[in-house]
Amino acid sequence: MTGSARSARKTVVPALFVVALTTIGLLSAPAAHAVSCSVNQARRFPETQLLEADAAINAGKVDDAIQIYKKALLTDPAKPALHAALAEAYLDQFKSDDAEAELKAAIAAHPHSAVLETVLAETQLQQGRPWDAQDTINHALADDPCYPDAHRSEEHTSELQSHHDL
Protein backbone atom coordinates (compact mmCIF):
# COMPACT_ATOMS: atom_id res chain seq x y z
CA MET A 1 0.00 0.00 0.00
CA THR A 2 1.43 3.39 -0.98
CA GLY A 3 1.76 6.29 1.45
CA SER A 4 -1.08 8.23 -0.19
CA ALA A 5 -3.40 5.22 -0.13
CA ARG A 6 -2.54 4.65 3.53
CA SER A 7 -3.32 8.29 4.44
CA ALA A 8 -6.53 8.22 2.40
CA ARG A 9 -7.61 5.12 4.28
CA LYS A 10 -6.88 6.81 7.62
CA THR A 11 -9.16 9.72 6.74
CA VAL A 12 -11.99 7.43 5.60
CA VAL A 13 -12.20 5.54 8.90
CA PRO A 14 -12.71 8.66 11.04
CA ALA A 15 -15.22 9.99 8.50
CA LEU A 16 -17.24 6.76 8.76
CA PHE A 17 -17.01 7.01 12.55
CA VAL A 18 -18.34 10.59 12.41
CA VAL A 19 -21.22 9.45 10.17
CA ALA A 20 -22.06 6.65 12.63
CA LEU A 21 -22.01 8.98 15.64
CA THR A 22 -24.16 11.49 13.76
CA THR A 23 -26.63 8.78 12.81
CA ILE A 24 -27.16 7.65 16.40
CA GLY A 25 -27.40 11.24 17.62
CA LEU A 26 -24.12 11.52 19.54
CA LEU A 27 -22.69 14.14 17.20
CA SER A 28 -24.26 17.06 15.40
CA ALA A 29 -24.45 17.03 11.63
CA PRO A 30 -21.07 17.55 9.92
CA ALA A 31 -22.53 20.20 7.60
CA ALA A 32 -23.18 22.54 10.52
CA HIS A 33 -19.66 21.93 11.78
CA ALA A 34 -18.21 22.73 8.36
CA VAL A 35 -20.10 26.03 8.26
CA SER A 36 -18.87 27.07 11.71
CA CYS A 37 -15.32 26.14 10.73
CA SER A 38 -15.43 28.37 7.69
CA VAL A 39 -16.83 31.22 9.80
CA ASN A 40 -14.11 30.64 12.39
CA GLN A 41 -11.45 30.64 9.68
CA ALA A 42 -12.72 33.97 8.39
CA ARG A 43 -12.60 35.48 11.89
CA ARG A 44 -9.17 34.06 12.77
CA PHE A 45 -7.25 36.79 10.89
CA PRO A 46 -7.33 39.33 13.74
CA GLU A 47 -6.21 36.69 16.26
CA THR A 48 -3.22 35.94 14.02
CA GLN A 49 -2.43 39.63 13.99
CA LEU A 50 -2.85 39.74 17.77
CA LEU A 51 -0.23 37.02 18.14
CA GLU A 52 2.05 38.86 15.72
CA ALA A 53 1.64 42.07 17.72
CA ASP A 54 2.32 40.23 20.99
CA ALA A 55 5.54 38.88 19.48
CA ALA A 56 6.53 42.40 18.44
CA ILE A 57 5.92 43.69 21.97
CA ASN A 58 7.96 40.83 23.44
CA ALA A 59 10.76 41.78 21.05
CA GLY A 60 10.59 45.40 22.26
CA LYS A 61 9.04 46.65 19.01
CA VAL A 62 6.00 48.40 20.47
CA ASP A 63 5.68 50.77 17.48
CA ASP A 64 5.38 47.74 15.19
CA ALA A 65 2.76 46.24 17.49
CA ILE A 66 0.74 49.45 17.42
CA GLN A 67 0.71 49.37 13.61
CA ILE A 68 -0.35 45.70 13.65
CA TYR A 69 -3.20 46.45 16.09
CA LYS A 70 -4.36 49.36 13.93
CA LYS A 71 -4.33 47.12 10.86
CA ALA A 72 -6.29 44.43 12.73
CA LEU A 73 -8.86 47.03 13.76
CA LEU A 74 -9.41 47.87 10.10
CA THR A 75 -10.32 44.20 9.61
CA ASP A 76 -12.43 43.83 12.75
CA PRO A 77 -13.26 47.19 14.37
CA ALA A 78 -15.99 45.66 16.54
CA LYS A 79 -13.55 43.63 18.63
CA PRO A 80 -13.06 45.24 22.07
CA ALA A 81 -9.98 43.10 22.81
CA LEU A 82 -8.14 44.69 19.87
CA HIS A 83 -8.93 48.20 21.12
CA ALA A 84 -7.77 47.18 24.60
CA ALA A 85 -4.54 45.70 23.22
CA LEU A 86 -3.83 48.87 21.23
CA ALA A 87 -4.43 50.99 24.33
CA GLU A 88 -2.12 48.77 26.38
CA ALA A 89 0.59 49.20 23.73
CA TYR A 90 0.16 52.96 24.05
CA LEU A 91 0.52 52.58 27.82
CA ASP A 92 3.74 50.62 27.29
CA GLN A 93 5.07 53.77 25.61
CA PHE A 94 3.65 56.02 28.35
CA LYS A 95 1.19 57.52 25.85
CA SER A 96 -1.70 57.53 28.29
CA ASP A 97 -3.57 60.28 26.43
CA ASP A 98 -3.55 58.17 23.24
CA ALA A 99 -4.62 55.12 25.23
CA GLU A 100 -7.47 57.02 26.87
CA ALA A 101 -8.68 58.43 23.53
CA GLU A 102 -8.65 54.93 21.98
CA LEU A 103 -10.52 53.45 24.94
CA LYS A 104 -13.15 56.19 25.17
CA ALA A 105 -13.93 55.83 21.47
CA ALA A 106 -14.14 52.05 21.83
CA ILE A 107 -16.33 52.32 24.95
CA ALA A 108 -18.68 54.63 23.05
CA ALA A 109 -19.16 51.77 20.57
CA HIS A 110 -19.17 49.05 23.29
CA PRO A 111 -20.57 50.77 26.39
CA HIS A 112 -20.73 47.63 28.55
CA SER A 113 -17.30 46.15 27.88
CA ALA A 114 -15.62 45.28 31.17
CA VAL A 115 -12.41 44.63 29.20
CA LEU A 116 -12.28 48.17 27.84
CA GLU A 117 -13.35 49.74 31.12
CA THR A 118 -10.67 47.84 33.03
CA VAL A 119 -7.91 49.03 30.68
CA LEU A 120 -9.32 52.55 30.94
CA ALA A 121 -9.03 52.29 34.73
CA GLU A 122 -5.39 51.21 34.33
CA THR A 123 -4.87 54.24 32.10
CA GLN A 124 -6.43 56.53 34.68
CA LEU A 125 -4.17 55.05 37.34
CA GLN A 126 -1.13 55.73 35.17
CA GLN A 127 -2.34 59.31 34.85
CA GLY A 128 -2.52 59.63 38.65
CA ARG A 129 -6.32 59.60 38.81
CA PRO A 130 -7.18 56.74 41.22
CA TRP A 131 -10.67 58.11 42.00
CA ASP A 132 -11.62 58.14 38.30
CA ALA A 133 -10.12 54.66 38.01
CA GLN A 134 -12.29 53.46 40.91
CA ASP A 135 -15.44 54.81 39.22
CA THR A 136 -14.45 53.11 35.97
CA ILE A 137 -13.76 49.81 37.75
CA ASN A 138 -17.16 50.05 39.43
CA HIS A 139 -18.73 50.32 35.96
CA ALA A 140 -16.66 47.36 34.74
CA LEU A 141 -17.76 45.22 37.69
CA ALA A 142 -21.38 46.25 37.16
CA ASP A 143 -21.10 45.20 33.51
CA ASP A 144 -19.34 41.90 34.30
CA PRO A 145 -19.07 41.00 37.98
CA CYS A 146 -17.07 37.89 37.08
CA TYR A 147 -14.32 39.59 35.06
CA PRO A 148 -11.14 38.73 37.03
CA ASP A 149 -8.99 41.59 35.69
CA ALA A 150 -11.54 44.09 36.96
CA HIS A 151 -11.28 42.58 40.44
CA ARG A 152 -7.48 42.77 40.31
CA SER A 153 -7.66 46.38 39.16
CA GLU A 154 -10.15 47.16 41.92
CA GLU A 155 -7.70 45.82 44.52
CA HIS A 156 -4.84 47.78 42.98
CA THR A 157 -6.91 50.97 42.81
CA SER A 158 -8.04 50.64 46.42
CA GLU A 159 -4.45 50.07 47.51
CA LEU A 160 -3.27 53.19 45.67
CA GLN A 161 -6.10 55.27 47.12
CA SER A 162 -5.29 54.13 50.66
CA HIS A 163 -1.61 55.08 50.18
CA HIS A 164 -2.61 58.45 48.76
CA ASP A 165 -4.92 59.14 51.72
CA LEU A 166 -2.08 58.58 54.23
Image (cartoon, helix red, strand yellow):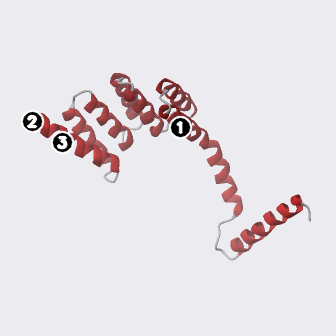
On the rendered structure, is 46 left or right of 148? right
135 left or right of 149?
left
Q: Quadrant of residue 71?
A: top right
Amino acid type at image mark 3: Glu
> What's the CA distance linking mark 1 and mark 2?
39 Å
Q: Earlier in the sequence, mark 1 or mark 2?
A: 1
Quadrant containing the C terminus is: top left
Q: Secondary structure at mark 2?
A: helix
The amino acid at mark 2 is: Asp
Asked if the residue at tag 3 contacts the one at tag 1, i.e. Cβ–Cβ closer than 8 Å, the answer is no
Element under disc 1: helix
Residue designated by label 3: 159
Residue to which mark 1 is pinned: 50
Amino acid type of the residue tagged 1 in the rendering: Leu
The percent position of residue 131, horizontal first and vertical second, equals 19, 34
For label 2, the residue is: 165
Q: Residue at x 21, y 30 (%)?
A: 129
